[in-house]
Structures are given as structure tokens and as C-alpha cells.
Image: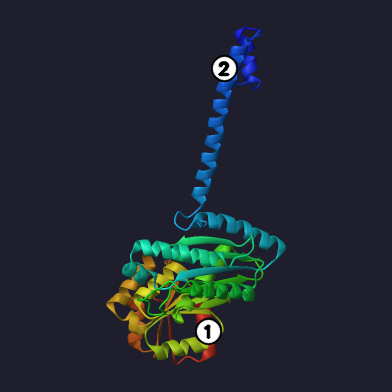
Amino acid sequence: MNEDENYREGIEAGGDDYLIKPVSFMIIKAKIRAMERIAEMRDQLNQLNAELEALSQLDSLTQIFNRRTFNELAQQQWALAKRHQQPISALMIDVDHFKLFNDHYGHPAGDTCLKKVTHAIKSCLHRSTDILGRYGGEEFIVLLPETDAKGAMRVAQAISEALENIQIRHDVSPSSTYVTASIGGATCLRTTGHDLEELIKNADRALYKAKRAGRNRSWIDEVATHKTLLLADANQDLVSYFSVHLQAHFNLLVADTQRECLELAVDLHPDLILLGSSIAATEAGAELCKILARTPKTASITLALVSETASSHNMDLAKNLGINHHFDTALSGPALLNKIIQALR
């Protein structure tokens, strides 16, 4: 059939060409060669698309999952853990003093270092469900499905040992003559009422604790319903008093300076910031309060002034800074706890 309508029907039926009988042998051969070229180009295009898709999922330097892909895969594992009510853990791994390493040895050496660190971490992950990603800069993240706190600690210690074994020189590190890592982990035994973001945030807080404890160590916490408090003051007596009374009831973080306080507030988003009077009474302290109030990530965080006395000077200081709560060391443990619970409501 050789009408135009026949051509249209043939193509719409799924054909890539339409030939009318009788067809010569030469035309058949020419058509087949043309179709072969099209098929080869299609296969090449599919392969390139597959390679581009793979590249878009990987970090270009370390060839492990980038942050976006890690989050997507981790959400899938979180959903499975929630469905089957299984424990799940996350590790945040930060190469200690990596900026000093880069400055001393140069960026090419820094890139080589990160590749070796990646290989060391991968050597400690033995299950197909374990997910490793580069979270940014010198920070890596691992998701460990069906893993409790003890299992997470075993993996963290194995990673530390693997790094120790490869012995990458770090002559300018204050912690060690070789490259080390601080590892913070979080375990969620019951996922109901929690989410993946909370798990990662808890792992990040544990990483902060590992760093504050001296680096080159692991710290694993369990995700709990405890609220997080950030205490910012350089007065060790004040810090000790509040730590003694609050540590058993809250996840307590400590910052020595205004800058550290701001960084932790933005990164970890505590439920309450306890601002010491020695910091709050300075110009930098007043600026800190302003920044916290106008930064979207911290604007909703409640602020409280803490001091050693309940003097009128401290009351005026809190009022001038726009702080509605004030706690002092004259309060008994139960009274302090009650006032903080009221402030968190």
C-alpha cells in the first residue's frame, strides 16, 4: 500500500521506516546500515546518560555519594527502619585540623589525604546497606542501618584504627603527628516520633563533644527526648554549677566565646541558650544577641541570662538585651530545673 495515509499509519503503529514491496536488496541493505548507525548512537547516548547520572550522585574528588544523594538514600533506609522498628545509627567524621594540613602541605596533598581517608572509612563498612557520603569539606557521614550504639562505636573505633594504620604525616597538628579524625555518632533505637534530620543533628552534636574532649576520639549518643541547652560563658565556676544541675536532664553544650556560641547555635539549633553575664555584658555579647534575633535559624531560640548573683545590674542587663529569663547560682537544683522547664515552654 503506497498512499500517504498508509505511510502515516505505518509510522504511528511503531515503525521507524516504511518500505513498499517489492523492495530491492540494495535498498534493504542501505536501510539496515542506517538503522544500525541510529541504534549505535542511541546506545552511546544511553551510556553517556547513565554515566552522567552516576557522576551527579558522586563527589568528584572522593567518588563516594555527595550530600544530596546520601540524604536521598538515607531517607529510604530511615523509612525501612521505621517500618520494621529497627535501630539505626549515623556517624559524622571530621578530619582533625585539616585546614592546618592544607595550609602546610598544599591543596593537592590535601586532596590526596581526603582520598586516603575515604578509602580507610570504606574499608570499615562491610554491608551493602551501609551508606557513606562526603558531607562537605573534610567532613564525612555514614549511615548504619540495623545498628545500635555499641555497633556504631565498633565501626567508629575501626575507622580510627584504619586511619592510624595508613599513617598520613601531619607535622603541624596539635593532636598527633599523623592525620586523625574526630567521630560523633547518634543511635535511634525507636524511630517513631523522630526523623532522619534529628538523627544527623544528634550525631553532629556528638561530634562537637568529641572535638571538645580533645579530638582524635569517638563519642556516641542515643537520640532521646532530652532538650538541648547551649551554655556560653568563660567562667568555669559558672559553667560547673549549671553543668552539675542540668547535665542529667538536658543535652548540654558549652561554648567559651561569642563566636563559638553563634556557630553552635546556627549549626545545632539548641532549644535554649544560657548566656553568661561575662559574655553578655560586652559589646560583642550585645551584638551576639542581635545576630541571634535576626538570623532565621536562631531567631526562635529562647535566650536566658545566667550569672552568679541576682543583682539589679544583671536584671537591667537582661532587660537591655531583650532577654526575658534570668538564672543565678543562688537557685537550688530543683528551683533552677523548674525555671528552665518553664522557659522552654
Label 1 and label 2: CA atoms lie apart by 82 Å
Asked which quadrant contains residue 211, the reply is bottom left
Residue 44, given in percent of the width and then of the height, sits at 53, 35
Task: Say which label, 1 or 2, has the lower sequence index.
Answer: 2
Residue 318, given in percent of the width and then of the height, sits at 36, 79
Residue 30: assigned label: 2
What amino acid is at disc 1? Gln
Locate residue 123 relative to residue 288 in the image: left or right. right
Above or below, comparing residue 111 to residue 250 in the picture: above
Locate residue 229 relative to residue 292 in the image: left or right. right
Which residue occupies 63% across, 61% down? 78
Residue 124: assigned label: none
Which element is circle 2 on? Answer: helix
Residue 36, given in percent of the width and then of the height, sits at 58, 26
Q: How many marks?
A: 2
Quarter of the picture holding the N terminus? top right
Residue at numbered disc 1? 247
**As rendered, which of 249 and 253 lies closer to the eye?**
253
Which element is circle 1 on? Answer: loop
Which residue occupies 64% across, 10% down? 23
